[in-house]
Image (cartoon, rainbow, N blue to C red):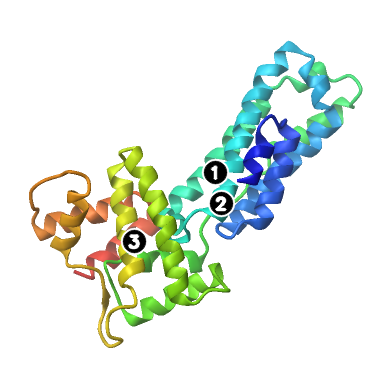
Amino acid sequence: MESFAQAVGADAIGLINLIVAAAQNATMHRKNCEQVAGHVRMIGNLLEKLKLTYLRSFPATGEPLDGLEEALRKALDMVESCREKSYLYVLAMGWTVVYQFREIQDEIDRYLKLVPLISVVHEYQIQNLKESLQAIEDDHREYTLDEEEMEAQSVILKRDRTKRDAIILEKSLSRQYPELKFREALQEEKEKLHVELQKSQVKNDIKQCCVIEHLIEVTEHVVNAPPEKNLSLNADAQYVTASKSSHGASGLQSEDQAKSEWQADLFDCCAEPCLSVFLKHFLLSNP
């Protein structure tokens, strides 16, 4: 990642510039990326007026500035992931990603409040400083999923998909991969998902592994069924057996128990209450 090399040793203003640039290239959660970029841009404007080298000369500001820069690096990683990661994976994570955007802004603002700016400023007018800080504090950004993202998410989280679902998925992928055919886009996603699967296996994150394996199944089977039938994944028992065997688990589960656990794994990725209720109704109505 080019910006990773640039981020090493970068100060807060440099990191903010990287975040703004990365947000312009984001292909997923674009609105959320633009929101966080807009917020940190306000902070950058303030820091440029105060001059970071000047702030660094005060012992009381050094540690909070280090924390601020670390939070900005997290924001940069988050925005970059909205360009490089698997589209289906980020889509499945849904509200988890939204919450991460919210948490990152809160963390950035917490560290900014810890910097005793007013006590070290002499050349900059105190009143202007107070107004700038208040504007940043009042800048409550809205991070969410749009309707198209929620519709596509509901499709990939289903175990059995209709022809209409496949059309929704194709439309969604065509926006992400405008130069690729549907099957080519699915293959691209499959390769990215295998990368995510390896990372989750290294972390021994079984729930994430199960979700990613489900998404890999989506890329493999969404277009294989005849048009008049459901575009279905493997049978319940087959899916659970495959998931369990890949993580060293033994024994078979009942179909109801397997389905319940599978749904619980996916609901963890959709923590927004209104969406959870919708998905539970949606999935439970498709036995």
Q: Disc 3 versus disc 2: distance between alpha carbons?
A: 28 Å
Looking at the image, the residue that sits furthest to the right is 123
Closer to the camera in the image, 231 or 261: 231
Q: Which of 6 and 258 is in front in this view?
A: 6
Mark 1 is surrounded, within 10 Å at the Cα level, by few (under 14), some (14 to 19) or many (20 or more) other residues, namely: some
Mark number displayed over residue 102: 1
- First in sequence: mark 2 or mark 1? 1
**Left or right, residue 67 beside residue 195:** right
Which residue is depicted at the point 59% across and 48% down?
Answer: 79
Q: Residue 143 carries which label?
A: 2
Rendered location of residue 58, percent (x, y):
77, 13
Q: Are marks 2 and 1 in contact (CB under 8 Å)?
A: yes
- What type is the residue that disc 2 sits on? Tyr
Among numbered discs 3 and 1, the one appearing first in the sequence: 1
Classify residue 277 as left or right of residue 30: left
Residue under numbered circle 3: 216
